Image (cartoon, grey):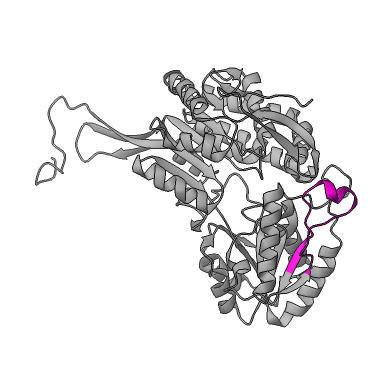
Amino acid sequence: MAEVYHNYIGGKWVPSQNGDTFESCNPACTSEVIGVFQRSNKQDVISAIDAAHAALPGWMSTPAPIRASYVRRVGQLLERDKEALAQLETREMGKVVEEGRGDVQEGIDMADYISGEGRRMFGETVPSELRDKFAMMVRQPLGVVGLITPWNFPVAIPTWKIFPALVTGNTIVFKPAEDTPAAATALVKLFEEAGLPAGVLNLVTGYGPEAGAPIVEDARIRMISFTGSSAVGREIAAKAGRDLKKTMLELGGKNPMIVMPDADLDLALEGALWGAFGTTGQRCTATSRIIVHRDIADEFTTRLIQQAKSLKVGYGLEPGVQVGPLINAQQLQTVDEYVQIGKQEGASLLLGGKRLTGGSYDNGYFYAPTIFGDVNYRMRIAQEEIFGPVVAVMPVSSYDEAIQVANSTEYGLSSSIYTRDVNLAFRAMRDMEAGISYVNAPTIGAEIQLPFGGVKATGNGHREAGTSAIKEFTEPKAIYVDYSGRLQRAQIDVEHHAS
C-alpha cells in the first residue's frame, strides 16, 4: 500500500477538505506508485492563502539576514539528502540519476547564492535636489505570492522561486506539478526541519484547474510566478491582469543551435547530443533545432545519427542509462503526434520516430531518440515546442540565413552558436533573439548567478535567478527625509531651482 501524503498548511500536514486524492507513478515503471497525494480544490487553496496572509506581518518584520538563514539551512539539508532526492526524482519524473543529482545541486547552489542576498538586497541612495533632504529607495516584499512549478526540474525550479521569495520577506502558496508532488513534498519537509515559521510556506498538491486557478484568482495573492507552457501562461496573464497582479512567466522555447563550417565538429556533436536528448528533451532550453551550414551538413548529420543510435534508453537508476522515459502517457502521445506531423510535412525521418516496446519498455513511457532532416523553418516541427527527444536538422547556406532561421519562431529562450570565428561569435550574441546565448556550448546549462528567461512568447519580460530574483519578488519604495525644519517644495511644484 502506497504512503499517503498531505498538504502543508499553516505549519501542519493536513488532508484535502474534499478527501480526494491522486497517485504519482513512476514513468519508467507505471505499476510503481510513488505515493498518494491530496487532490486539492479551491477550499484548500483558500486555507493556504489564509495561513500565508496571517504569517505575513511576522515574516515581513523578521530581519532579512534571519530570513536568509532558513534558506541557508535548507541548502545544507539538500546537500545532506542529495542522493535520496536524486533517486526520488528518477523514480517520480524519469530523468537519469546523474541529472537528478544536478537538479538537487542547483537547489544547493541557489541556497548559497540567495542566502547571501539577505545581507545585501541593495536599494539606492541618490542626491536630493533640495538642501537638507535625504533621498533613497528600498526594496519591500510584495506580500503573499503564488508559485506554480513544472515537473521537469522538481527541486531546482521550486528553489529558484521559493528561496528568493522567502529572503525578500514574502509568504508563499506553492503548487507543484501534479506529476511530481513527492519531490515537492520532500522539499517542503526540509523547510519544516529547518524550523521555518508556520504559515510562511504552504503546499497544496493537485491539478491546475482545481488548485492552480484558485491561486491565480484570489485577490490576496499579489504575484504569480509560473513556469510552464505558453498557452497556460497567457491564461494566467489575462486573469492576473484584471486584478493588476504581478506575474513572472517562464514559458516555452524552440531553441536553435547554429553550427558554422569552422566549428569544432566533435565539440558541436557532443553538445547537440546533450542539448537535444538530455532530460529526454523535456527542457524548455532543449536544443530542438540544429541549424547547420550546408558545407558540413552531411557529415554532421551522419555523425549525429551514429552517436544518437548509441544512446542507452531505459530506467534512470540503471547503470549506463543516458535517456529516460517521457513523463506520462499524454506527453508520449504528443511527441508521437508531432513525429507524424513532421513526416506529413515532408521532413525526412532519419532516426527513431517510435515508442520503444518490448521487455521493460512496455512498463514505461519510452520514446526513441528522434532526428529529422530536410526540415524547412516553416514546418510545425520547426516552430512548435515538442518537449521530447526530437531534434530537427536544418541546413543553411550562410550566417545571415542561419540567424533568420534561428529567429523565425515565436519563442526566444536559449540559443547557441559553434564557431572559432570570434567576430562571428560576437555578431551572433547580438543578433540572436533570445534571453540566453551560448558560444561553443549547447542551449542547456544555465547558471543561477545570471538571469534566466527569454523574449517574445517565452515570457513576459521578467527573469529568474541572479540579482533579478530579488527585484522580481520585491517592489521599490522611494523614501524622502526632509531635515530642514521648514516646508520645501520640490521642483515639480515650483518654477525655479531650489536655492
**Residue occupying the point 62% across, 20% down:** 192
Horizontal relation, residue 279 to residue 381: left or right: right
Task: Decide: is 487 above or below 352.
Answer: above
Any part of residue 123 in sight: no
**Residue occupying the point 52% across, 23% down:** 200
Residue 354 magenta-highlighted: yes
Give the magenta part as a residue range: 351-371
Instruction: Tell me which corner region of the image, top left, top right, bottom left or bottom right, holds residue 269.
Output: bottom right
Horizontal relation, residue 124 to residue 224: left or right: left
**In the foreground, 217 or 8:** 217
Point out the image quarter for the N terminus: top right
Any part of residue 354 in sight: yes
Magenta highlight: main SS = loop
Point out the image quarter for the C terminus: top left
Q: State the image coordinates of residue 6 (x, y, percent, origin top left).
A: 64, 23
Q: State the image coordinates of residue 31 (x, y, percent, origin top left).
A: 81, 38
Task: Decide: is 304 above or below 475.
Answer: below
Residue 355 magenta-highlighted: yes
Q: State the image coordinates of residue 48 (x, y, percent, origin top left).
A: 50, 24
**Residue occupying the point 53% across, 60% down:** 412
**Residue occupying the point 35% across, 43% down:** 242
**In the foreground, 75 or 188:** 188
**In the foreground, 402 or 353:** 353
Q: Residue furthest left?
A: 495
Task: Decide: is 179 above or below 6.
Answer: below
Q: State the image coordinates of residue 440 (x, y, percent, origin top left).
A: 68, 64
Instruction: Tell me which corner region of the image, top left, top right, bottom left or bottom right, holds residue 148.
Output: top right
